[in-house]
Structures are given as structure tokens and as C-alpha cells.
Image (tube, grey):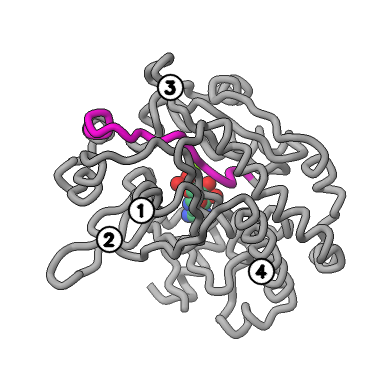
Amino acid sequence: MQQEQQMESVARSGAERLPGTPQEHLSSETTRTVLRIQHRMLMGIRRHLDEAGFTELHAPVIGPVTDPGCRGAKQVDIDFYGRRYKLMTSAILYKQASLHAFDRIFCVAPNIRLEPPETASTSRHLAEFHQIDVEVAGYTREQIMDVAQGIVVAAVREVVTTMPQELERLGRDTDAFKDLLERPFDVITHAEAVGQVDGDPHAEIDWEGEARISRKATRPFFVTDYPKGSRGFYDRESREHPGMLRNFDLLAPEGYGELASGSEREFEYARIVTRMRETGENPAKYGWYLDMVREGIQGSAGFGIGFERLTRYITGVQYVWEASAYPKLPGVFSA
Ligand code: AMP
Ligand code: MG
């Protein structure tokens, strides 16, 4: 299909505006303002994490295996000297490995996920995006949720104090962040969240339900305790409540939806292999990772914040592609 035809079909399916050519997109005043704000956000986040004792590592792009927990999205294979390798859908396996070097690490990690083409019109899916990926040895879920909150607050505070005029130019009222800067984020359980939207207690909250609870909020909030089956093998299962995961999502208010997912991690060999089997993964594929786990890794907790999603929420732009210099929408052949 020609690019224009494809753009049209995306447009018909709901996205009213699409990125133009790279030269149009990059020279637009809106893009340039959003990217300057995004730069400032990252400066604020890096400073915040540096002061908290984190070391930034540079995430891998390829590996023999990658995060299988991205339901609905396909992985990309590449030929690595005659072997099939993957482009990273997330850095999770390497984040656990990183704790051999340092107890607190973060990466600004590029991810490739071939999301279904229909997600091109959700305003919040890209095929290529970045995560602020964090992992801390020995942390509990509650401790790592504090770190996630700290990052969002640091990014918002940095932008609100240093770039209020730019926000105004984008039509983003800085009052939108008053509540966020004043009080800790609320926490609800997955069971409570699905109760609010008549959802399935055994599954992910669907996008429509998520958008509904997000629209009601005035500052980001956490949803905890997702059921097993909704997430990858690495989210630690509660010992007290089998079937419930020691994990969380962070949702933005105003309908922006999910910003981050995180958890305490499984770290014991036997449990990881069992969880892999339960989630339909073949342990034989995970050679280097399981060898490492067998030798022993630390318990940890971590999360990934979608950097373009966070930028979209802070700048208030309508589409997540507006928060990317080189946007790739699912199924759209662009630069
Ligand atoms: P996940 O591991 O799927 O929870 O992804 C971690 C975070 O990355 C999510 O909370 C989102 O903020 C972001 N993210 C995931 N998929 C996409 C996508 N297709 N486009 C943009 N951001 C994404
Ligand atoms: Mg998620």
C-alpha cells in the first residue's frame, strides 16, 4: 500500500492528524516546543536520579531474546551472524543483569514493538518509543512506586518552573499540575479499578475502561495487584495471595492513561521457569538469562515509564507521535 493510502486509512480509523514529512514535522513550532520541553524533562529526571545514587547505563538494542510480556505486539527478528536475534521490546532482562554492576540503575531505552495497525489511531501507540527504565536491588513494590512518583514529579516540576511560557504556548495550563505537586499519588487495587468500570477481574483493564478511570482523576495514580496471566513471567507473584502480582501501573489523569508499568521481580530459578511455562514461554529460549538466574541474582523491583507518553501528558499534546522527533506509527510506512 502507498504511504498516502495508508495514512488515509489511519485517518479514517480515527486519527485526525498525522505527522507530515520529517522536514514538516521537525520544523513545526509545536514539535520544536514539545522537543525542547522533553529535553528539559530528561535533564530534570537525570539530575533527580543522579542525586538519588542511580547510575545510567545504555540499554542494548538487540539480543537473543527479549521481553515476551507485550501482549498484542509482535517482536522483530534480525539476522545476527546467522542466528535469529530480537530487537528489544523492553530492557527488562538486562535490567536484572545490571544489578551485578550497581544496586540502582536506569536507562533511556529504545523499544520496538510491532503493535497492531489499528493502534495507530489510539493517540498513544508508537511502533518505536523509549522508556525511562529503572531497577533497584532489594526494593519492595512500595519503595519502587515512590521512585516512579519521584521521577514524574521531578519532570513536571522542572518543566513548570523553567518553561511555563512554552507550556502556555502549547495551550497547557500549569494549574493542571497543582494537585500533582502538592500531594502523593493515590493508590487503588486492580480489583477496585475493574469494579469502577465493570471490567474482568482476571484480565488487564481494557483501553476504554482505563481511559474512563483516567479521565476522572486530577493527578497521576497507581493501580496495584494485577492478576497473574495479565503480565510477563518476571512480575513477582504474591506469596500471601497466589495469583496476584506484586506489580503496579501508573496512570496519568485527564484520559491520558497508562504512563508506566512496574513490579517486584521474580528472581528464583525454579519460580521463573514455572512462570515462563505458565505464560507459554519456552525456557530453552532464555539461555543466558536462565544461566545467570541459576547462578543467583538479587531480588529487585523496577519499572519503565513511556517517555513519549510522559511527554504527551506534560505538554498536553493530543497525539503521542507529537512527542517523538522521528515518529513511527504502527503499520504506517514513514521515514
Ligand atoms: P509495558 O512494558 O508494555 O508496560 O510498557 C512500559 C511503558 O511503555 C508503558 O507504561 C507505556 O508508557 C510505554 N509504552 C508501551 N507501549 C507503547 C507504545 N506502543 N507506544 C508508546 N509507548 C508505549
Ligand atoms: Mg504496561
The circle on residue 244 is 3
What's the amino acid at mark 3? Met
- Horizontal side of 163 relative to 94 (left or right) equals right
Please say if the residues under marks 4 and 2 sit with CB atoms less than 8 Å apart: no
- Horizontal side of 85 relative to 31 (left or right) equals left
Badge 2 marks a residue whose secondary structure is: strand
Mark 1 or mark 4: which comes first in sequence?
4
In this orientation, which residue lies closer to the viewer: 310 or 23? Answer: 310
The quadrant where residue 18 appears: bottom right
> In the rendered structure, does residue 272 fall within the stretch colored magenta?
yes
Q: Is residue 122 visible?
A: no
Residue 225 screen position, x and y as percent: 50, 25
Residue 196 screen position, x and y as percent: 63, 23
Q: Which residue is mark 4?
A: 39
Q: Which residue is mark 1?
A: 94
* Up/down of 63 relative to 82, above or below: above
Badge 4 marks a residue whose secondary structure is: helix
What's the amino acid at mark 2? Gly
In this orientation, which residue lies closer to the viewer: 99 or 119? Answer: 99
